[in-house]
Amino acid sequence: MAFVASASLLPFNRIFGGGKKWNQLFPGYSTRLRVGPSGLSKFRTCSFASAATGGKAGGALTEISQADETPRIFSWPHNKRPRVCILGGGFGGLYTALRLESLVWPDDKKPQVLLVDQSERFVFKPMLYELLSGEVDAWEIAPLFSELLANTGVEFFQDRVKLLHPSDHWGTNGPKQSSCGGTVLLESGLLIEYDWLVLALGAEAKLDIVPGALEFALPFSTLEDACKVDKKLRALERKNFGKGSLIRVAVVGCGYSGVELAATVSERLQDRGIVQAINVETTICPTAPTGNREAALKVLSSRKVQLLLGYFVRCIQRVSDVEASADATGIREGKDIAECNSEKYVLELQPAERGLESQILEADLVLWTVGSKALLPELEPCDKPHELPLNARGQAETDETLQVKGHPRIFALGDSSALRDPTGRLLPATAQVAFQQADFAGWNLWAAINQRPLLPFRFQNLGEMMTLGRNDAAISPSFIEGLTLEGAIGHAARKIAYLIRLPTDEHRFKVGLSWFAKSAIDSVASVQSTITKVLSGS
């Protein structure tokens, strides 16, 4: 389903015949964009990538000028086939696209699928910690979308979502003046009409809840975050090499992410650093199975991780607050925190429980794992209200079929969805939930397009897993109550489970070979080390 980019982007006036029809289709929009024949000539090149053309994006993303630029319309290759636009290429979005590709369709009903993500790579986020430990390579857990989708009919655009204008709030078939389900405007200025929309934009770290966190703390939720943390650790390791001074790392939050990060960093630094983990709760991983929590406590204790439980961070400041200093200038000018290698930070801790006293911590690196916010796009202003129903976290409220309430042509899953289980509790925003929802979303799109009944989503908790180091993990499968696999066995079981969940057969095969080769090399090295010790001892 490859197509040439220049043939796929058509001028606005050529599609809609000028501003009159534009205003009919998008009431209230004319105040944002000027309709005129000069708009297209002044518009800069759109940055997008196609799986069929190698997935390369050219140039920086640009925003539409309010004065003299008009959007360009993406032209789908087939006029009669359903058009499915998927926003977000994480577990929810990518796996929904692959699920749609795997289903059997009538010839005239097979949808055209367009996947949009701000990154050029899919990221298997549960294994980001292994990048810090050096256990995996980036290509293994962050393959290019262009490679994953090369043998499919799914098109990929690398872009950001700017505005969403659904038009299905009148009913399944949309308003009379438009047969589409709505439109999506990308930051590059490309306007996409869709029949069906999947919201799977994920979430980002929420750092603005504590003064200083946005400026001085590093989140750990994306590939870029992991690379920044690794870069900062390498800089600190080089700086402190041979000096005997300890590297101090503060991890804010002791949920799964915080505990896995603390375990991984403490193992990497060993006796060259001190890791302190802060949590407002009086225990770590409060929602985790008992076996996982106990295994984690045992590992953290053996690596001398200091747990500061029952505290919240009041603020984060630089030790040196001389604004004219080179480090302060670097922060103001937007340089990476990882580049400011000589800075130290002070965390002011306030007790969340009675009987505790306030504390002041000093750290070379602050890692933030608390809080997140959904990345749903803004809605286009319209004469008639049609806002998506959002909860306090910015997630779309969905029914049990994963359809957004009041919008039968929009599905939401993963971090973009606020779906409740039969007891009324929100499902956790985990990779396991998004993975299962993608399977249902793909099937329900098939059912909706073919006018079949939709299936209600039922989450099946298969268990919980956490990494605790290069050769250590904890797994509590749900089908055997009370069982927890720890240590090397848990580590091997976790890697096998994640290998099975990688996106495509081809990628699974390549990664499996790579992991097998690494394991063989490590085993040979271990045997050689053991033999050397035995011989030297005799």
Image (cartoon, grey):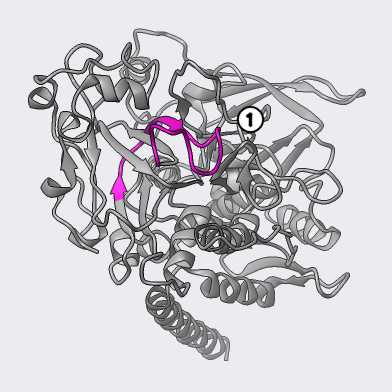
Q: Which stretch appears magenta?
A: 157-179
Q: Is residue 227 left or right of residue 491?
A: left
Residue 244 at x, y percent in the picture:
50, 43
> Residue 196 location in percent, x, y?
46, 48
Q: Is residue 135 visible?
A: no
Determine if the magenta segment contains residue 174: yes
Q: Residue furthest front?
A: 176
Q: Secondary structure at mark 1?
A: loop
User: Which of the two residues, 265 or 194, is positioned nearer the viewer here?
Assistant: 194
Residue where numbered disc 1 is placed: 390
Look at 47% across and 11% down and name the residue there.
321
Q: Amino acid at mark 1?
A: Leu
Q: Quadrant of residue 392?
A: top right
Q: Quadrant of the C terminus?
A: bottom right
Q: Residue at x 28, y 67 (%)?
A: 150
* Secondary structure character of the magenta stretch overall: loop
How many numbered marks appear? 1
323, above or below 312, in the image: above
Depicted 269 relative to depicted 516: above or below:
above
The answer to whether any part of residue 171 appears in the image is yes
**Which residue is painted at 18% across and 59% down in the image?**
53
Across and down, in percent, residue 381 comes to 45, 18
Could you say which is closer to the camera, residue 515 or residue 361? 515
Quadrant of the frame with the N terminus: bottom left
How would you rate the neighbour count of disc 1 (Cα within 10 Å): few for under 14, some for 14-19, many for 20 or more? some
* Nearer the observer, 134 or 452: 452
In-front residue for pair 528/490: 490
Estimate the x, y position of residue 270 in percent, counting from the top left: 57, 54
- The residue under the point 81% across, 36% down is 281
Location of residue 326 (image quadrant): top left
* Residue 472 relative to residue 201: left or right: right
> Is 133 part of what is drawn in magenta?
no
